[in-house]
Image (cartoon, rainbow, N blue to C red):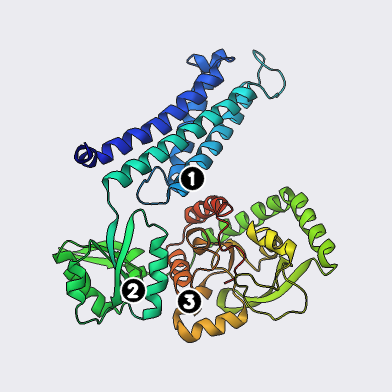
Protein backbone atom coordinates (compact mmCIF):
# COMPACT_ATOMS: atom_id res chain seq x y z
CA UNK A 1 0.00 0.00 0.00
CA UNK A 2 2.83 2.39 0.93
CA UNK A 3 4.59 1.56 -2.34
CA UNK A 4 1.40 2.33 -4.28
CA UNK A 5 0.94 5.62 -2.44
CA UNK A 6 4.54 6.58 -3.20
CA UNK A 7 4.07 5.86 -6.89
CA UNK A 8 0.93 7.99 -7.14
CA UNK A 9 1.86 10.62 -4.56
CA UNK A 10 1.66 13.53 -6.99
CA UNK A 11 -1.74 12.28 -8.18
CA UNK A 12 -3.13 12.17 -4.65
CA UNK A 13 -1.76 15.64 -3.88
CA UNK A 14 -3.30 17.01 -7.08
CA UNK A 15 -6.66 15.54 -6.04
CA UNK A 16 -6.39 17.17 -2.62
CA UNK A 17 -5.50 20.48 -4.28
CA UNK A 18 -8.50 20.14 -6.59
CA UNK A 19 -10.78 19.52 -3.62
CA UNK A 20 -9.50 22.66 -1.89
CA UNK A 21 -9.81 25.00 -4.88
CA UNK A 22 -12.85 23.58 -6.68
CA UNK A 23 -14.60 22.53 -3.48
CA UNK A 24 -14.03 25.97 -1.97
CA UNK A 25 -15.50 27.67 -5.03
CA UNK A 26 -18.54 25.39 -5.10
CA UNK A 27 -19.20 26.03 -1.40
CA UNK A 28 -19.01 29.80 -1.90
CA UNK A 29 -21.29 29.95 -4.94
CA UNK A 30 -23.78 27.40 -3.56
CA UNK A 31 -24.25 29.28 -0.30
CA UNK A 32 -24.40 32.67 -1.99
CA UNK A 33 -27.02 31.29 -4.36
CA UNK A 34 -29.44 30.17 -1.63
CA UNK A 35 -31.03 33.61 -1.29
CA UNK A 36 -29.99 34.99 -4.68
CA UNK A 37 -31.52 33.59 -7.88
CA UNK A 38 -29.04 35.52 -10.05
CA UNK A 39 -26.21 33.47 -8.51
CA UNK A 40 -28.09 30.18 -8.90
CA UNK A 41 -28.80 30.76 -12.58
CA UNK A 42 -26.74 31.84 -15.56
CA UNK A 43 -26.70 35.62 -15.40
CA UNK A 44 -24.39 38.59 -15.78
CA UNK A 45 -23.91 38.65 -12.01
CA UNK A 46 -22.84 34.99 -11.94
CA UNK A 47 -20.44 35.42 -14.88
CA UNK A 48 -18.78 38.51 -13.37
CA UNK A 49 -18.46 36.81 -9.98
CA UNK A 50 -17.05 33.60 -11.52
CA UNK A 51 -14.49 35.47 -13.63
CA UNK A 52 -13.44 37.55 -10.61
CA UNK A 53 -13.13 34.45 -8.44
CA UNK A 54 -11.04 32.48 -10.97
CA UNK A 55 -8.72 35.38 -11.80
CA UNK A 56 -8.09 36.19 -8.13
CA UNK A 57 -7.50 32.53 -7.27
CA UNK A 58 -4.88 32.26 -10.03
CA UNK A 59 -3.27 35.62 -9.21
CA UNK A 60 -3.02 34.97 -5.46
CA UNK A 61 -1.69 31.44 -5.99
CA UNK A 62 1.16 33.00 -7.97
CA UNK A 63 1.84 35.51 -5.19
CA UNK A 64 1.42 33.42 -2.04
CA UNK A 65 2.20 30.01 -3.45
CA UNK A 66 -0.29 27.20 -3.64
CA UNK A 67 -0.64 23.68 -2.35
CA UNK A 68 3.11 22.91 -2.50
CA UNK A 69 3.34 20.09 0.02
CA UNK A 70 6.95 19.08 0.63
CA UNK A 71 8.31 22.45 -0.49
CA UNK A 72 7.12 24.73 2.32
CA UNK A 73 6.15 24.17 5.92
CA UNK A 74 2.60 22.94 6.49
CA UNK A 75 1.75 26.01 8.59
CA UNK A 76 2.84 28.43 5.86
CA UNK A 77 0.90 26.50 3.21
CA UNK A 78 -2.22 26.73 5.39
CA UNK A 79 -1.75 30.47 6.01
CA UNK A 80 -1.14 31.15 2.31
CA UNK A 81 -4.21 29.22 1.17
CA UNK A 82 -6.36 30.73 3.93
CA UNK A 83 -5.32 34.29 3.12
CA UNK A 84 -5.80 33.70 -0.61
CA UNK A 85 -9.28 32.29 -0.02
CA UNK A 86 -10.21 35.16 2.32
CA UNK A 87 -9.16 37.82 -0.21
CA UNK A 88 -10.84 36.00 -3.12
CA UNK A 89 -14.11 35.50 -1.27
CA UNK A 90 -14.16 39.06 0.06
CA UNK A 91 -13.54 40.73 -3.29
CA UNK A 92 -16.05 38.45 -5.05
CA UNK A 93 -18.60 39.14 -2.31
CA UNK A 94 -18.17 42.90 -2.72
CA UNK A 95 -18.54 42.42 -6.49
CA UNK A 96 -21.81 40.57 -5.80
CA UNK A 97 -23.11 43.43 -3.63
CA UNK A 98 -22.26 45.95 -6.34
CA UNK A 99 -23.91 43.87 -9.09
CA UNK A 100 -26.92 43.34 -6.81
CA UNK A 101 -27.54 47.08 -6.54
CA UNK A 102 -30.04 47.74 -9.33
CA UNK A 103 -33.72 48.44 -9.95
CA UNK A 104 -34.62 44.74 -9.94
CA UNK A 105 -33.01 43.96 -6.56
CA UNK A 106 -31.74 46.68 -4.24
CA UNK A 107 -32.10 50.30 -5.28
CA UNK A 108 -29.46 51.27 -2.73
CA UNK A 109 -26.24 49.51 -1.80
CA UNK A 110 -26.79 47.22 1.17
CA UNK A 111 -25.12 44.26 2.86
CA UNK A 112 -26.95 41.00 2.18
CA UNK A 113 -26.28 37.27 2.56
CA UNK A 114 -23.40 38.04 4.92
CA UNK A 115 -24.21 35.01 7.05
CA UNK A 116 -23.77 32.70 4.05
CA UNK A 117 -20.55 34.50 3.10
CA UNK A 118 -19.16 33.97 6.61
CA UNK A 119 -20.31 30.32 6.63
CA UNK A 120 -18.51 29.70 3.33
CA UNK A 121 -15.29 31.04 4.87
CA UNK A 122 -15.64 28.64 7.80
CA UNK A 123 -16.24 25.62 5.55
CA UNK A 124 -13.36 26.59 3.27
CA UNK A 125 -11.08 26.93 6.28
CA UNK A 126 -12.07 23.42 7.29
CA UNK A 127 -11.29 22.11 3.79
CA UNK A 128 -7.87 23.78 3.79
CA UNK A 129 -7.05 22.54 7.29
CA UNK A 130 -8.11 18.94 6.63
CA UNK A 131 -6.47 18.49 3.22
CA UNK A 132 -3.29 20.40 4.08
CA UNK A 133 -2.85 18.15 7.10
CA UNK A 134 -3.81 15.05 5.11
CA UNK A 135 -1.42 15.93 2.28
CA UNK A 136 1.46 16.57 4.69
CA UNK A 137 0.87 13.27 6.51
CA UNK A 138 0.71 11.36 3.21
CA UNK A 139 3.90 13.01 1.96
CA UNK A 140 5.76 12.26 5.20
CA UNK A 141 4.59 8.67 5.26
CA UNK A 142 5.81 7.79 1.76
CA UNK A 143 8.79 10.13 1.46
CA UNK A 144 11.33 9.47 4.22
CA UNK A 145 13.47 12.40 5.32
CA UNK A 146 16.46 12.99 3.05
CA UNK A 147 19.81 12.16 4.66
CA UNK A 148 21.74 15.42 4.43
CA UNK A 149 25.41 16.38 4.30
CA UNK A 150 26.22 20.07 4.85
CA UNK A 151 29.36 21.43 3.18
CA UNK A 152 30.55 24.91 4.09
CA UNK A 153 33.67 27.07 4.39
CA UNK A 154 33.86 27.36 8.18
CA UNK A 155 32.96 25.14 11.11
CA UNK A 156 30.84 27.91 12.64
CA UNK A 157 28.64 27.92 9.53
CA UNK A 158 28.00 24.19 9.76
CA UNK A 159 26.14 24.57 13.05
CA UNK A 160 24.07 27.53 11.80
CA UNK A 161 23.06 25.76 8.59
CA UNK A 162 22.32 22.54 10.49
CA UNK A 163 19.91 24.47 12.72
CA UNK A 164 18.28 26.07 9.68
CA UNK A 165 17.78 22.72 7.92
CA UNK A 166 16.56 21.18 11.20
CA UNK A 167 13.51 23.46 11.06
CA UNK A 168 12.37 21.09 8.30
CA UNK A 169 13.25 17.92 10.23
CA UNK A 170 10.27 16.05 8.79
CA UNK A 171 11.84 16.32 5.33
CA UNK A 172 15.58 16.58 6.03
CA UNK A 173 17.81 14.68 8.46
CA UNK A 174 21.25 16.23 8.91
CA UNK A 175 23.58 13.27 9.43
CA UNK A 176 26.94 14.85 8.59
CA UNK A 177 28.73 18.16 8.00
CA UNK A 178 32.23 19.15 6.95
CA UNK A 179 34.39 21.76 5.23
CA UNK A 180 34.64 21.65 1.45
CA UNK A 181 38.32 20.57 1.66
CA UNK A 182 37.76 17.53 3.91
CA UNK A 183 39.94 14.66 2.57
CA UNK A 184 37.08 12.13 2.61
CA UNK A 185 34.40 14.47 1.25
CA UNK A 186 33.52 12.32 -1.77
CA UNK A 187 32.99 9.30 0.43
CA UNK A 188 30.71 11.41 2.66
CA UNK A 189 28.71 12.54 -0.36
CA UNK A 190 28.10 8.95 -1.42
CA UNK A 191 26.75 8.19 2.07
CA UNK A 192 23.81 10.64 1.89
CA UNK A 193 20.83 11.47 -0.32
CA UNK A 194 21.32 15.25 -0.45
CA UNK A 195 24.12 17.79 -0.16
CA UNK A 196 23.75 21.39 1.02
CA UNK A 197 26.44 23.83 -0.15
CA UNK A 198 26.87 27.06 1.82
CA UNK A 199 29.47 29.74 1.03
CA UNK A 200 31.77 27.28 -0.76
CA UNK A 201 34.33 28.83 -3.21
CA UNK A 202 33.01 28.60 -6.80
CA UNK A 203 35.80 26.39 -8.18
CA UNK A 204 35.61 23.76 -5.44
CA UNK A 205 31.81 23.90 -5.43
CA UNK A 206 31.64 23.28 -9.18
CA UNK A 207 33.77 20.13 -8.86
CA UNK A 208 31.67 18.80 -5.97
CA UNK A 209 28.36 19.58 -7.70
CA UNK A 210 29.57 17.66 -10.76
CA UNK A 211 30.40 14.75 -8.47
CA UNK A 212 26.89 14.92 -6.95
CA UNK A 213 25.39 14.96 -10.44
CA UNK A 214 27.43 11.90 -11.41
CA UNK A 215 26.20 9.96 -8.37
CA UNK A 216 22.60 11.31 -8.46
CA UNK A 217 22.77 13.11 -5.11
CA UNK A 218 20.29 15.95 -4.61
CA UNK A 219 21.94 19.37 -4.50
CA UNK A 220 20.91 22.50 -2.52
CA UNK A 221 22.98 25.60 -3.27
CA UNK A 222 23.16 28.82 -1.29
CA UNK A 223 23.77 31.35 -4.10
CA UNK A 224 26.62 33.83 -4.39
CA UNK A 225 27.01 36.91 -6.61
CA UNK A 226 27.80 34.92 -9.76
CA UNK A 227 24.73 32.74 -9.17
CA UNK A 228 22.52 35.85 -8.95
CA UNK A 229 23.72 36.93 -12.39
CA UNK A 230 22.69 33.55 -13.80
CA UNK A 231 19.37 33.47 -11.91
CA UNK A 232 18.28 36.85 -13.30
CA UNK A 233 19.70 36.40 -16.82
CA UNK A 234 17.88 35.50 -20.01
CA UNK A 235 18.84 33.12 -22.80
CA UNK A 236 20.30 34.28 -26.12
CA UNK A 237 21.39 32.15 -29.07
CA UNK A 238 24.34 33.23 -31.20
CA UNK A 239 24.24 30.83 -34.10
CA UNK A 240 23.96 27.51 -32.34
CA UNK A 241 25.73 28.68 -29.18
CA UNK A 242 23.68 29.42 -26.06
CA UNK A 243 24.59 32.35 -23.79
CA UNK A 244 23.04 33.61 -20.60
CA UNK A 245 22.76 37.40 -20.99
CA UNK A 246 22.57 39.86 -18.12
CA UNK A 247 22.42 43.60 -18.77
CA UNK A 248 22.88 45.82 -15.74
CA UNK A 249 20.41 48.64 -16.28
CA UNK A 250 18.77 51.03 -13.84
CA UNK A 251 15.01 51.43 -13.57
CA UNK A 252 13.29 53.06 -16.52
CA UNK A 253 11.52 56.40 -16.15
CA UNK A 254 8.16 54.62 -16.34
CA UNK A 255 9.14 52.18 -13.56
CA UNK A 256 10.36 55.01 -11.32
CA UNK A 257 7.16 56.99 -11.94
CA UNK A 258 4.82 54.06 -11.21
CA UNK A 259 6.84 53.01 -8.16
CA UNK A 260 6.69 56.55 -6.73
CA UNK A 261 2.93 56.85 -7.33
CA UNK A 262 2.42 53.50 -5.58
CA UNK A 263 4.61 54.65 -2.68
CA UNK A 264 2.65 57.86 -2.10
CA UNK A 265 -0.84 56.42 -2.68
CA UNK A 266 -0.48 53.22 -0.64
CA UNK A 267 1.44 54.91 2.19
CA UNK A 268 -1.15 57.68 2.56
CA UNK A 269 -3.95 55.10 2.61
CA UNK A 270 -2.12 52.95 5.18
CA UNK A 271 -1.51 55.97 7.41
CA UNK A 272 -5.25 56.67 7.46
CA UNK A 273 -6.25 53.03 8.05
CA UNK A 274 -3.67 52.45 10.80
CA UNK A 275 -4.25 55.78 12.58
CA UNK A 276 -6.20 54.12 15.47
CA UNK A 277 -3.46 51.51 15.89
CA UNK A 278 -0.78 54.21 15.87
CA UNK A 279 -2.71 56.13 18.53
CA UNK A 280 -2.86 53.04 20.76
CA UNK A 281 0.88 52.48 20.24
CA UNK A 282 1.66 56.10 21.16
CA UNK A 283 -0.44 55.88 24.34
CA UNK A 284 1.22 52.57 25.33
CA UNK A 285 4.71 54.03 24.87
CA UNK A 286 3.94 57.27 26.69
CA UNK A 287 2.21 55.56 29.61
CA UNK A 288 5.06 53.08 29.92
CA UNK A 289 7.90 55.40 30.92
CA UNK A 290 6.73 58.87 29.93
CA UNK A 291 9.44 59.19 27.28
CA UNK A 292 9.22 60.25 23.65
CA UNK A 293 6.90 58.34 21.35
CA UNK A 294 9.00 58.45 18.18
CA UNK A 295 12.59 57.37 17.68
CA UNK A 296 14.87 58.84 15.01
CA UNK A 297 18.05 57.28 13.72
CA UNK A 298 20.42 57.86 10.80
CA UNK A 299 20.09 55.20 8.12
CA UNK A 300 21.64 54.64 4.67
CA UNK A 301 19.67 54.54 1.43
CA UNK A 302 20.36 54.78 -2.33
CA UNK A 303 23.91 55.81 -3.28
CA UNK A 304 24.88 55.96 0.40
CA UNK A 305 22.66 58.95 1.14
CA UNK A 306 21.66 59.21 4.80
CA UNK A 307 18.32 60.21 6.31
CA UNK A 308 16.49 60.17 9.64
CA UNK A 309 14.25 57.12 9.88
CA UNK A 310 11.11 57.33 12.06
CA UNK A 311 9.96 54.47 14.27
CA UNK A 312 7.86 54.04 17.37
CA UNK A 313 10.32 53.90 20.27
CA UNK A 314 10.63 50.34 21.56
CA UNK A 315 13.71 50.75 23.77
CA UNK A 316 14.49 52.71 26.88
CA UNK A 317 15.83 56.19 26.29
CA UNK A 318 19.54 57.03 26.49
CA UNK A 319 20.77 53.47 26.02
CA UNK A 320 23.55 52.06 23.83
CA UNK A 321 22.80 52.31 20.11
CA UNK A 322 23.16 48.80 18.67
CA UNK A 323 20.99 46.09 17.14
CA UNK A 324 18.61 44.26 19.46
CA UNK A 325 19.15 40.67 20.56
CA UNK A 326 17.33 37.90 22.47
CA UNK A 327 15.96 39.04 25.85
CA UNK A 328 17.44 42.50 25.31
CA UNK A 329 16.95 44.45 28.55
CA UNK A 330 16.78 47.72 26.62
CA UNK A 331 13.43 46.78 25.06
CA UNK A 332 10.42 48.15 26.92
CA UNK A 333 7.30 46.14 27.74
CA UNK A 334 5.29 47.99 25.10
CA UNK A 335 8.25 47.71 22.74
CA UNK A 336 8.16 43.91 22.73
CA UNK A 337 4.54 43.96 21.62
CA UNK A 338 5.23 46.60 18.96
CA UNK A 339 8.20 44.67 17.59
CA UNK A 340 6.38 41.35 17.60
CA UNK A 341 3.75 42.61 15.16
CA UNK A 342 6.03 45.11 13.35
CA UNK A 343 3.86 48.02 14.53
CA UNK A 344 6.99 50.00 15.37
CA UNK A 345 7.61 50.32 11.61
CA UNK A 346 4.41 52.31 10.88
CA UNK A 347 5.97 55.82 11.18
CA UNK A 348 8.23 54.90 8.27
CA UNK A 349 5.22 55.51 6.03
CA UNK A 350 6.04 59.20 6.59
CA UNK A 351 9.59 58.55 5.35
CA UNK A 352 8.11 56.97 2.22
CA UNK A 353 5.85 59.94 1.47
CA UNK A 354 8.83 62.27 2.00
CA UNK A 355 10.83 60.26 -0.55
CA UNK A 356 13.48 58.96 1.87
CA UNK A 357 12.32 55.38 1.35
CA UNK A 358 10.14 53.24 -0.88
CA UNK A 359 7.51 50.68 0.08
CA UNK A 360 9.69 47.89 -1.31
CA UNK A 361 13.46 47.78 -1.35
CA UNK A 362 16.49 46.73 0.72
CA UNK A 363 16.03 47.56 4.39
CA UNK A 364 17.82 50.76 5.47
CA UNK A 365 20.62 49.82 7.84
CA UNK A 366 22.22 51.57 10.79
CA UNK A 367 25.36 53.37 9.64
CA UNK A 368 27.42 51.47 12.20
CA UNK A 369 26.17 48.16 10.80
CA UNK A 370 26.90 49.15 7.20
CA UNK A 371 30.58 49.82 8.02
CA UNK A 372 30.84 46.57 9.97
CA UNK A 373 29.19 44.40 7.31
CA UNK A 374 31.26 45.89 4.47
CA UNK A 375 34.46 44.78 6.24
CA UNK A 376 33.31 41.15 6.01
CA UNK A 377 31.24 41.48 2.83
CA UNK A 378 32.56 44.16 0.44
CA UNK A 379 29.58 43.41 -1.82
CA UNK A 380 27.24 44.77 0.89
CA UNK A 381 27.48 48.24 -0.67
CA UNK A 382 25.71 46.92 -3.79
CA UNK A 383 22.45 47.08 -1.80
CA UNK A 384 22.67 50.87 -2.04
CA UNK A 385 21.98 50.74 -5.78
CA UNK A 386 18.28 51.05 -4.95
CA UNK A 387 16.27 53.16 -2.53
CA UNK A 388 15.72 51.55 0.86
CA UNK A 389 12.31 50.02 1.54
CA UNK A 390 9.84 49.38 4.34
CA UNK A 391 9.60 45.76 3.23
CA UNK A 392 11.52 43.67 0.75
CA UNK A 393 12.38 40.21 -0.49
CA UNK A 394 14.69 39.66 2.49
CA UNK A 395 11.82 40.45 4.87
CA UNK A 396 9.23 38.15 3.27
CA UNK A 397 11.65 35.30 2.59
CA UNK A 398 13.91 35.52 5.64
CA UNK A 399 13.53 36.33 9.30
CA UNK A 400 13.99 39.46 11.34
CA UNK A 401 17.53 38.35 12.24
CA UNK A 402 18.64 36.60 9.03
CA UNK A 403 22.43 36.80 8.62
CA UNK A 404 23.96 39.74 6.77
CA UNK A 405 25.20 37.49 3.95
CA UNK A 406 21.83 35.87 3.35
CA UNK A 407 19.97 39.18 3.47
CA UNK A 408 22.50 40.59 1.02
CA UNK A 409 21.82 37.74 -1.42
CA UNK A 410 18.04 38.24 -1.20
CA UNK A 411 18.35 42.01 -1.62
CA UNK A 412 20.59 41.63 -4.68
CA UNK A 413 18.17 39.15 -6.24
CA UNK A 414 15.43 41.77 -5.80
CA UNK A 415 17.56 44.56 -7.29
CA UNK A 416 18.73 42.57 -10.30
CA UNK A 417 15.30 41.09 -11.03
CA UNK A 418 13.28 44.24 -10.28
CA UNK A 419 9.81 44.76 -11.74
CA UNK A 420 6.64 46.52 -10.65
CA UNK A 421 4.96 43.11 -10.53
CA UNK A 422 7.69 41.89 -8.15
CA UNK A 423 6.91 44.85 -5.85
CA UNK A 424 3.21 43.95 -5.89
CA UNK A 425 3.99 40.31 -5.02
CA UNK A 426 6.21 41.38 -2.11
CA UNK A 427 3.57 43.79 -0.77
CA UNK A 428 0.95 41.02 -0.75
CA UNK A 429 3.35 38.54 0.83
CA UNK A 430 4.28 41.01 3.56
CA UNK A 431 0.89 40.27 5.15
CA UNK A 432 2.09 36.72 5.83
CA UNK A 433 5.09 38.09 7.77
CA UNK A 434 2.70 39.37 10.46
CA UNK A 435 1.98 35.74 11.34
CA UNK A 436 5.70 34.90 11.71
CA UNK A 437 6.28 36.12 15.23
CA UNK A 438 9.54 34.20 15.78
CA UNK A 439 12.67 36.32 16.22
CA UNK A 440 10.56 39.46 15.94
CA UNK A 441 12.29 41.23 18.79
CA UNK A 442 15.71 40.85 17.24
CA UNK A 443 17.20 43.57 15.10
CA UNK A 444 19.45 43.20 12.08
Residue 253 is tagged as none
Q: Residues within 10 Å of mark 3 (few under 14, many from 20)?
A: some
Left/right placement of residue 53 relative to residue 99 reads left
Query: Residue 175 at what x, y percent from top left?
Result: 29, 66
Residue 207 shows in the view: no
Eye-nearest disc, 1 or 3: 1
Q: Quadrant of the N terminus?
A: top left
Provide residue 281's location: percent of width, then percent of height: 76, 57
Count of numbered circles in the view:
3
Residue at image x 35%, y 76%? Answer: 199
The residue wearing badge 3 is 382
Q: Which residue is mark 1?
A: 80
- Disc 1 from disc 2: Cα separation: 32 Å
* Residue 274 rendering spot, x and y as whole percentages: 72, 51
Mark 1 or mark 2: which is in front? 1
Q: Residue at x 39, y 57 (%)?
A: 168
Query: Which is more N-terminal, label 2 or label 1?
Result: 1
Across and down, in percent, residue 331 comes to 70, 69
Question: Which secondary structure, mark 3?
Answer: helix
- Label pair 1/2, CB-CB below 8 angstroms: no
Name the image quarter holding residue 378. bottom left
Which of 356 and 127 lies nearest the eye of the viewer?
A: 127
Which residue is drawn at the image coordinates 24% and 67% (left, top)? 243
Horizontal arrangement in the rendering, residue 101 relative to residue 46 (left or right): right
Q: Secondary structure at mark 1?
A: helix
Circle 1 residues within 10 Å: few <14, some 14–19, many ≥20: many
Amino acid sequence: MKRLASRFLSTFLNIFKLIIYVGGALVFFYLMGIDNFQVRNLSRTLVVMAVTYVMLTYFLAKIYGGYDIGVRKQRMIFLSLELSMLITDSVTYVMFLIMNTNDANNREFEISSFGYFFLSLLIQTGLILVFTNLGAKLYDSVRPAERVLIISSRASEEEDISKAVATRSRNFDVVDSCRYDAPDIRERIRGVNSVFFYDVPPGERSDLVNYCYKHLRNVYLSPDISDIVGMTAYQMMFGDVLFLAKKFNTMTFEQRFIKRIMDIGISALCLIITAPLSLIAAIAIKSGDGGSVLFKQKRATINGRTFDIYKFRTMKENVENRSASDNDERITKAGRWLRKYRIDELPQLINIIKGDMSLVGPRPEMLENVSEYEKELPEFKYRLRMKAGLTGLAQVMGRYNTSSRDKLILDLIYIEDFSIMADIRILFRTVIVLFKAEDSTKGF
